[in-house]
Amino acid sequence: MQKAAKLVLVGIGYRPLSERASAIVRNAEVLLASTRLLEVFKRYAEYEGAKDRIKVIDKVPETIAFIQDELRTSNSKLRTIVLLASGDPLFFGIGRRMIEEFGAEQVEIIPDLSSMQEAFSRINLPWDDAFCISVHGGPDIAKRRALPYEMTDIPWLLEKHGKLAILTDKQNNPAEIGKIVGSEIVMHVCERIGYSDERIWTGTAGEARELNFRDPNVVILLKQGVRSGDKEATFFGLRESEIQHDQGMITKDEVRAVTIHKLRLPRKAVLWDIGAGSGSVSLEAARLSQDICVFSIEKEAFRVEMIKRNAVLLGISNVRVIHGAAPEALESLPVPDRVFIGGSTSRLDEIVDVVSRSMQKGIVVINAATLETLRDGVASLERCGYVTEVSEISVSRSRSIAGKKLMNALNPVFIMKGEKA
């Protein structure tokens, strides 16, 4: 009985083939390779004995069609098909696609090192704490594949993880990455790893914006202050000093923490931040999940620009800043799941009315510094059918006087929560 044909993915690029991989390549009836990988394979000792059995196919759909024909034809004499792959086929490679197409029982993977492993080794940086993504959309720019992360996700991923490794392509290249992250971010570009013209470039994102880099390459980004083993990339807990603001006009750290807690943000949500000021609540909320889309509504133009600068400096991409006064500026916004009102300029009742009409269920949180706003806020929420609760936040912070620490009280803040189930 003829043995069923099998597909073996052999990773190449960085090390000589293992004894098992070498034997499979030598005995395979056909070897499939792209033009680029054929050039790589020519450096291997096995090439001379295999070159007459190599079939070059550059497009993945055509490769799959060829393999399907060979594996599904009962009269096929092929016992082993070898597909040469780059590095580790299961690390942002073709291995996932082949297993999905042909099933795990018919596919064998023999990996080489991954390009990311090699990249980190070139700069002597541990990568067990790095977050790795691919923005390589495939060789055909007109038919780019869907990716879990897009270029616009890079700033917040870097902010969240502190150390980011990126597989690029010709369109999503190091220069374009440099344009969307802070100019002082440390960037390593590892060009053509494993080739004779390999090059490692190190500089800042600002410097990379004006340069050209050769393909293929891997980009490694480091948030300022993040070194090997550092855990400085925070998930929650922005400090007032990290947010540009106007003469102390900012929701204080402790109050912001309680405010976010009261909002009970789901992983995926639309949040309106009305009277956003410096954007501290918007920015803190946006960092919790990239699937939280925050609309920061602010009427003062200079504060609008301040929020935008803060978002760029913090690498946050899921905040949309709306220049306008509420409630008029709310009319065309997507339906919110949560609403925070930090400023209302004496129009709180109108704003709550618009919010109530827009949001059938969800949570509204209002912060107030005066008893009058507390009274009006609770009345407006209850009139619109919200179940309310109020917390008073009194914060005292230590300060040193004559070598001793004393507590200094800040003005209390009332936090109103209204909820519709």
Image (cartoon, rainbow, N blue to C red):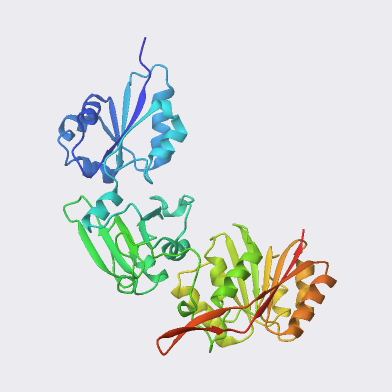
Q: Residue furthest right?
A: 383
Q: Position of residue 98 (x, y in %)?
A: 41, 35
The picture quadrant where one finds residue 376 is bottom right
Res. 168 in view:
no
Left or right: 340 in relation to 301:
right
In the picture shown, does residue 27 fall above or below 48? above
In the picture shown, does residue 129 fall above or below 363? above
Residue at image position (23%, 24%) is 27
- Quadrant (top left, top right, bottom left, bottom right) of the C terminus: bottom right
Residue at image position (32%, 28%) is 81
The picture quadrant where one finds residue 284 is bottom right
Q: Position of residue 68 (x, y in %)?
A: 43, 29
Q: Position of residue 95 (x, y in %)?
A: 38, 38
The picture quadrant where one finds residue 289 is bottom right
Residue at image position (39%, 71%) is 179
Q: Position of residue 303 (x, y in %)?
A: 56, 84
Res. 325 in view:
yes
Which of the two residues, 134 or 393, is positioned nearer the viewer here?
A: 393
Residue at image position (56%, 81%) is 250
In the picture shown, does residue 357 fall above or below 36? below
Disc count in the image?
A: 0
